[in-house]
Amino acid sequence: MRRLLGQVQFMPENSTLTVLGDPELAEQSYSRAGKIIRLELDILGETVDLHIHVAQTQARLADIVPIAHAVSTNITDKVTEMVRLSGAHIPCGKGCSACCSYLVPLSVPEVFRLKQEVLTMPASRQEHIWQVCLSASQRLLEHPPLHLSDDSTTPGVTANQSDMDALSQWYRNLKLPCPLLHEGVCTIYNQRPLACRECFVTGCALACGGGQAVAEKIEMPVRISEVLGRLASELEGTGTEALIMPLALLWAEENPERDERTWPAEMMVGRFVEIIKASRSETTVTPAAPAKH
């Protein structure tokens, strides 16, 4: 099955939603019609303070993703900085693909945004991504997970935690390459999924690939990947949905009407901020001692 995405015209990104880190800049630069919505969070004693300019217009689910990326980056930067200051080693970074065969769940907004990102790539790269997705999809069908509830194997349905653990191990055993990897490097690193952005470990990257080493996952005070899933669920009136990476683009093509739905941008961002604040957990990151390599 051949997908000629390169023939589809991709419109430039609009400025419906814009993150401004400096409150003075927010007031000076955005005097045009719209509203500034502020997000202030305490992250392990450090403050994340962002101002989001929202135009008085409608927004699609994909439009909120860059905002989610900016919030996630600010949170993870604070957490990882503290962990490093404690003396622990964090091997994660651009160029490390040790965890790129893990199951990566994408919320519905991320799926539609991913499709937009792929459409900006050269036709040859798009074709390669589609071929990898189709090949991976076939392998998933040939090797279904065992001992799971029926909903767990349905694309777009989030499983319970026990099933998710089993799904993660099943997926990892298949050793499927991420469709977005090229020669070991993520081709959309700056726009990578939230699940990837929020995955950090201390210790040695060799452990992520199943090697004889030690790594410990860093817990985040709030996971924006989960926030985005909940937001989409509320807006669309569905259960919380997630798509695994190889199936995401296929699913997006089959659901174009959901991609086109819009909501008032101010309402969307306001609710996004409310969910973040409500989801702020009391998890304390305890920096691990540096691992021996």
Image: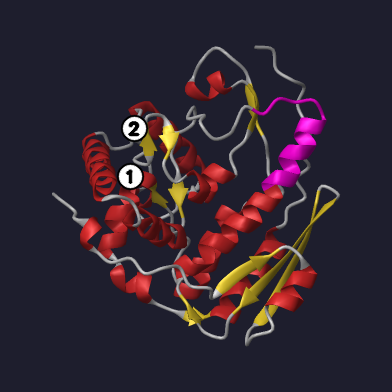
User: Which dot marks residue 176?
Assistant: 2
Judged from the image, the secondary structure of the residue bearing numbered disc 1 is helix
Residue visible at 24% across and 35% down?
139
Task: Decide: few, some or many residues near mark 2? Use Cα within 10 Å; few <14, some 14-19, many ≥20.
Answer: many
- Spot occupied by residue 140 in the image (x, y as percentages of width and height): 27, 38
Left or right, residue 225 beside residue 147: right
Q: Which residues are magenta?
A: 76-90
Residue type for callout 2: Leu
10 Å crowding of disc 1: few (<14), some (14-19), many (20+) = many
Q: Please state if 5 lies on the left or on the right of 64 as rendered.
A: left
- Quadrant occupied by the C terminus: top right
- Give the x, y percent position of residue 8: 24, 64
Q: Which residue is mark 1?
A: 246
- Residue 89 within the magenta-colored segment of the rendering: yes
Q: Is residue 9 above or below residue 101?
A: below
- Disc 1 to disc 2: CB gap under 8 Å: yes
Q: Is residue 11 above or below residue 220?
A: below
Q: CA distance from mark 1 to mark 2?
A: 9 Å
Quarter residue 10 falls in: bottom left
Q: Amino acid at mark 1?
A: Pro
